[in-house]
Image (cartoon, grey):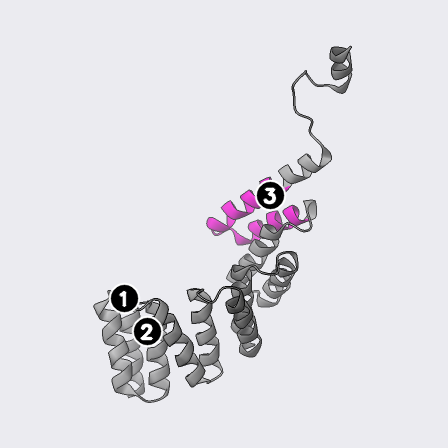
Amino acid sequence: MLGSILGKLGRQPGSPVISADDDDQQAVSVHHLKGMELAAQGMHAKALGEFRKAIAAKWDFFDAHHELGRTHLTLGEFDKAIKALRTALRVCPDHVDAHNDLGTAYDSAGNSVEAIKIFMQALRIKPDAIDVRNNLANAYFNIGSYAEAMKAYNQVLERQANDATAHYGLALVQIDLKNKESALMEHQHLMENGHVELADRVLAEIEAQF
C-alpha cells in the first residue's frame, strides 16, 4: 500500500519531500551565488539582475539585498545603493558591514553628515571595527572636521598601530592644516612599513601644497 501511494506521488520510498519552500530556497541560493560570481567577474549589471531574482524568490533574504546595494555602490549608483542597503538593514538591523557600506554610499554621494551618523551606529554595535572607524574619520575629513578626523584615525592606530589607511588619512589632515613636518612623519611611517604607493601619494601632495 505504501509503495502504491508513493508511486502515485511520483516518489520512491525514502526519497525526500520537496516542498514549495525548498524550491524557493533553492532558487534564492542559485540566483545569489550566480550574482556573486558575475560581480566577481566584473559583470555588475548582470549581477544586479540575479540579486533581484533572489529577492523576488525570498523578499527578506538579507545577503541578496546587501550584495545588491554593494553592487550599486561599485557602479557609483549611490541612491540605489542607499535604498538597497537600508532594506538590508531592515532585515538585519545589527549587521556592521551593511552599516559600513551604507555610510560609504552616503559619504560618496556627498552626504558626509548622514554617513557619520551611520558609521557611529556601526561602532556602537562593534567598537573595534577598523574599517568603520577609518571611514568615520574620512567622513569627518570631508566636512573639514579635522580634530574629529584625527581623533578617529588615532583611535584606529591605538588598535592597529601600522594601519596604512589611518596613517595616510592623518597625512592628508596635516597637509590641509599646513603642518608639513607632521605630514612628512606620516610619509616616513608609510615608507618604513612598506606602503610605498600611499607614501608616494602623500609626498606628491606635500610637494603640490608646500
Q: Name the residue under label 2.
A: 167
Q: Name the residue under label 1.
A: 195
Label 2 sits on what residue type? His
The image's mark for residue 51 is none
- Magenta range is 28-55
**Do the residues under discs 3 and 1 have CB atoms within 8 angstroms?**
no
Reply yes or no: does residue 51 show up in magenta.
Answer: yes
Residue 63 image offset from top left, x and y in percent: 58, 51
Q: Name the residue under label 3.
A: 31
**Predominant secondary structure in magenta?**
helix
Question: Nearest the camera: 42 or 83?
Answer: 83
Reply yes or no: does residue 96 show up in magenta.
Answer: no
**Do the residues under discs 2 and 1 have CB atoms within 8 angstroms?**
yes
Question: Nearest the camera: 210 or 102?
Answer: 102
Label 3 sits on what residue type? His
Residue 160 image offset from top left, x and y in percent: 34, 66
